Amino acid sequence: MSAQEINNASVLEALAAEFGELIINSDEPYGFLTIEIPAEKNTAIIQWLKEHPTIKMNFLTDLCGVHFPDNKGKEIGVVYHLHSWTNNFRMRIKCFVAAATPEVPTLITLFDAANWMERETFDFYGIQFVGHPDLRRILNMDEMDYHPLLKQYALEDETRDDKDDRFFGR
Amino acid sequence: MSQLDTHNHGNFVSTETIDGEIATLNLGPTHPATHGVFQNVMKVDGERILSSEPTIGYIHRAFEKLAERRPYNQITPITDRLNYCSSPINNMGWHMTVEKLAGIHVPKKVDYMRVIIMELARISDHLVCNSVIGVDTGALTGFTYVFQEREKIYEMFEEVCGARLTTNIGRIGGFEREFSPVFFSKLKKFLKEFPGKYQEFDDLLTRNRIFMDRVIGAGPITPEKAIGYGFTGPNLRAAGVDYDVRVMNPYSSYEDFDFTIPIGKDGDTYDRFIVRQEEIKQSFYIIQQPLDAMPEGLFHACTCFLPSCQGRGIQQHGSLNLSL
């Protein structure tokens, strides 16, 4: 595979050839290759992408959490954005876990950048990054006893009637 | 001389000390020189820092939560606060993300208008950053010089959108109106006068022996480490990596314009300063191009509204990622 051939189809094909069933599904929203993988395989797959001789996903652009309360058994997700600078190719990797056991292996061995981003994701979504050496809250105070970006925490007090949505365009 | 090893993901740990006495120093959380609430618990041996444990502070303002219940156009003012020194770039990043999501194609003219605004914002942000490093190293004068120039840029923003700092500039799909003649006259005046002022500031710091002594060799980082830590923007380029989103993945018609990407060599504070100084020049050079070649046409897209998506803009501190 030469540098010119790195595109959504070729990367997906290479992934499917290497990992087969582990690529749960794939999509290309707005031309952006997105795959879903099992959470426990994230390190192996991302390491493969990083160390692949031609794909070379050398940069962890972003790592964040998502919460879909209605997605039973797969409520909590972690989304990784990888970027290959040599091929100027970007892709998104998602993995989902159950809210009861939100455990995802850490990426710290691959990217130093994962350290603080995983702390942030833990802080806001309560995702346990297994193997992280220093998984403490990073932006909220240590005494906080909940993870504020989970959907069960509403932004505003639902019982208030002095805020009429009509006046706020929603 | 202590031997410094870097392990534990960048925490500096010393293996030996000068006189065997290590003190713990609590710097912050409100130390005035840190520009923001930042706490550092450091182990020091004399004047040498052996290890440091930073607490970046309780600075999260729950933008994601706020955005959960708002229509897209009400989220723009929130993006102002992502970096209040260059709100317009954050606004544009947001507009472009929503446009991508909604499949809106903006006219060329909008792209060019945006580039002018974004590069003005980059100049003002870099001026703050570079003059403040002067203040931190003991030279207040340059700061007062360039703040006058920043003021002029803010006056132009005011002319376009009515606000100065938290601009909420433009709309999803373009701008709410044309740039006024007053804006253009202010911009032309700025373009004429700025190089002199910039030179005055540059003369004060860039080759100043005291300044150089204080920043050269301070906080260097290797390209490999910078990439591993996810650096983007001038801090990455100072380490010698010629990565710039405006060139790598051009947006807002950046491919139409001619400019150079300055890079550093050692990734230290001096290189970061120099890269920003040079980027100010490049931004200045970019602004004239869309101004001279401003296309005819509408200043907004014709949208009838409105589906996940990710857009990206380079912000003066690095790339800005918005996931929607």
Image (cartoon, coloured by chain):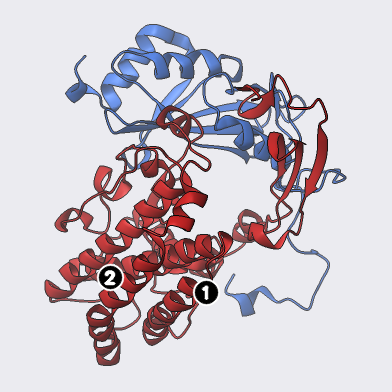
| Mark 2 residue element | helix
Q: Is residue B176 left or right of residue B229?
A: left
Query: For this rendering, which residue is in front, B202 or A2?
Result: B202
Q: Residues within 10 Å of mark 1 (few under 14, many from 20)?
A: many
Q: Is residue B174 visible from the viewing direction of this image?
A: no
**Which dot marks residue B166?**
1
Of helix, strand and loop, which one carries label 1? loop
Quadrant in the picture for residue B267: top left
Q: Which chain is blue?
A: A
Relative to residue B282, is residue B221 depicted above or below? above
Which chain is represented by red in the image? B
Crowding at dot 2, Cα within 10 Å, few <14 / some 14-19 / many 20+, comes out as many
Front-lying residue, B275 or A54: B275
Q: Chain for mark 1? A: B
Task: Pinpoint residue B262: horizontal percent, then vertical percent.
Answer: 28, 48
Gap between marks 1 and 2 measured at Cα: 17 Å
Instruction: Please state if B224 lies on the left or on the right of B262 as rendered.
Output: right
Which of the pair B117/B219 is nearer the observer? Answer: B219
Q: Is residue B216 visible?
A: yes
Tell me what residue is drawn at x 25 percent, y 86 percent. B189
Instruction: Give the residue type that dot 2 points to.
Output: Ile
Which residue does the image show at 22% across and 56% down from the upper left? B254
| Quarter of the N terminus of chain B within the rendering | top right
Residue B251 position within the rendered picture, expressed as x and y whole percent measured from the top left: 27, 53
* Residue A55, above or below A119: above
Left or right, B40 with respect to A67, comes to right
- Give residue B163's position: percent from left, percent from top: 48, 82
What label sits on residue B116 in the rendered view? 2
Q: Nearer the viewer, residue B20 or A88?
A: B20
Q: Which residue of the protein is positioned furthest toward the bottom in this rendering?
A: B182
Chain letter belonging to callout 2: B
Q: Is residue B71 above or below residue B260?
A: below
